[in-house]
Image (cartoon, rainbow, N blue to C red):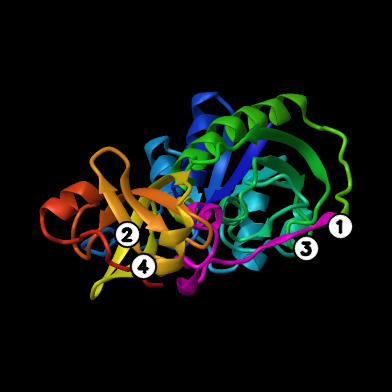
Amino acid sequence: MRILFLGTPEFAASYLEFLLKKGYNVVAVISQADKPRGRGQRLLPTPVKEVALRYNIPVFQPKSLTKEGMEIIEKFKPDIGIVVAYGRLLKNPFLSAIPFYNIHTSLLPKYRGAAPMQRCLEAGEKVTGVTIFKISEGMDDGDIAMQKAFEVGECETLGEVYEKMIKHGTELLDEFLKSYPVPLIRQDHSQATYAAKIEKEDFYVDFSQSAEAVRNKIRAYDPLPGAKTILNTFEVKLFGACEIENIDNEKLINTLPGTIISIDKIKGALVRCKDGGLWIKYVQFPGKNRVEFYAAKNGGLVKEGVVLNS
């Protein structure tokens, strides 16, 4: 089977490398344009392009799939297209030239759209998974080929779910390609939900919400880019939110949401939320590495009684 692979970021690169190491016949790769990356903002190849070059696979970065994409298909004659986080919608005539299948990081029809992993964590989902579906011209609404579900722990972060998506997703892709062609199942569009694109305001923590909701917000952006709050005059990032603890009514009445009730060497900072306290282990100040709240306290950067504001 001759495979055309479309993808751009590190996540997609993991899938491409998996296919190549497994010996699948990837005849060509399409990625988006190179962009400045890293602290120096140097123009670097996309992660998918880096993998393709390392394995000597022809890689293209067309501005338009309508013309250049069709030329790639005509030249390499792929039997199937595999799409992982390419970052651009596929449209006819390119879409109808060969069957294209997308690896999507949710159990469709839930969490269609740009940010399924983050939105899943924000919502506190206990189960998520990977879906392989045949791409249509709609937004993630094509017929489903295969799905694989897995559990999400109450304290698991975006980084941990990301790794699970690669592990389970590559296994599912291997199974799909070995079984191809597979019967397709129509999505129940009445059950569809939308995972909206992440905006800057999404990063800010609202401590007037429940401790569980605050925990979900922090872990949805841990380790990147980090959920944000204001500590004194600094905009800081928070990581390592897990344990929820009851706070007596007197403290709930006499403190504001966001108040740091205590700072512990092991657990971090206990922060007052709407209905109790949440332990948050790490804080990151601008231009610095993340540190434990206990270390920040010893350095005079934070103390009990300070209020974190969104």
Query: Quick one: label 1, few (<14), some, or many (20+) residues within 10 Å?
Result: few
Location of mark 3 (residue): 137
CA separation in Å, label 1 and label 4? 37 Å
Residue at the image position 24 percent from the left and 72 percent from the top: 232
Mark 3 or mark 1: whose residue is earlier in sequence: 3
Position of 282 with respect to 72 (left or right) is left
Q: Residues within 10 Å of mark 3 (few under 14, many from 20)?
A: few
Q: Secondary structure at mark 1?
A: helix
The three-letter code of the residue at mark 2 reads Ile
Give the labeled residue for mark 1: 189
Q: Is residue 54 magenta?
A: no
Q: CA distance from mark 3 to mark 2?
A: 49 Å
Pick whichever of labels 2 and 1 is earlier in the sequence: 1
Looking at the figure, which quarter contains the N terminus? Answer: top right
Q: Earlier in the sequence, mark 3 or mark 2?
A: 3
In depth, the one of 190 and 238 nearer the eye is: 238
Residue at which label 4 appears: 229
Q: Earlier in the sequence, mark 4 or mark 3?
A: 3
Tell me if mark 2 has few (under 14), some (14-19) or many (20+) residues whose alpha carbon lies within 10 angstroms of its own: many
Give the Cα separation between the discs numbered 4 and 3: 39 Å
Tell me if residue 184 comes above or below residue 95 in the rendering. above
Left or right side of 7 for 261: left
Closer to viewer: mark 3 or mark 2: 2
